[in-house]
Image: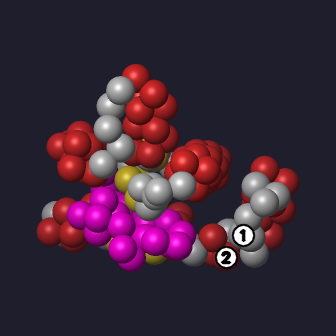
Amino acid sequence: MSIIQELINLGRIYLAIPYSHSDEEVKELRYEIANWISAYLMRMDAIVFSPITHSHPLVKYGLPTGYEYWKTQDESFMDTCASIIVITLDGYEESNGVNSEIMYMTNSDKPVHYLNLNELTKQDKELALMVFNHINLV
């Protein structure tokens, strides 16, 4: 059994991914990757909460993008999750939000798994390449 399947079997998964960036196109791309990974996990019957999928569309209604604003919201959802999957895109190690989420889940004695997109199946990588033909997922 894969580690992803083991995490799915534990219950609800919190999906962490770096988001903040000075380039709006990078933020938009990270949002799309969060959506794609959420759908990937859901096709495996996971119950997933992706804070970027949830919050990114709300920014156009005047809400801020900084983690300090979203921290209370995110911690409330993390309390209901059994584990966290961290997507290891560039910038995840420097991300205040991702680091806070990892610390919160670690302090809650919940498993933390780091997912490199190279861990995905060949078929799913091919699908991702069709969707995100301008980034390297392989």
Residue 99 among magenta residues: yes
Asked if one can make out residue 11 in the rendered structure from this viewpoint, the answer is no
- The front one of 77 and 129 is 129
Quarter location, residue 116: bottom right
How is colour applied across the structure in the image?
secondary structure
> Contact (CB < 8 A) between labels 2 and 1?
yes
Q: Is residue 133 above or below residue 46?
A: below
- 137 or 80, which is in the foreground? 137
Residue beneath disc 2: 118
The amino acid beneath tag 2 is: Asn
Q: Is 82 situated left or right of 40 in this image? A: left
Indicate whether residue 36 is drawn in magenta.
no
Q: Which mark, residue 122?
A: none
What's the residue at 40%, 37% (across, down)? 55
**Number of numbered callouts drawn:** 2
Residue 95 picture location, percent across and down: 36, 67
The residue positioned 74% from the left and 70% from the top of the image is 136
Which contiguous range is marked in magenta? 80-100
Q: Say whether disc 2 or disc 1 marks the residue closer to the N-terminus.
A: 2
Residue 137: give its label: 1
Corner quadrant of residue 60 = top left
Residue pictured at 75% horizontal, 75% vertical: 138
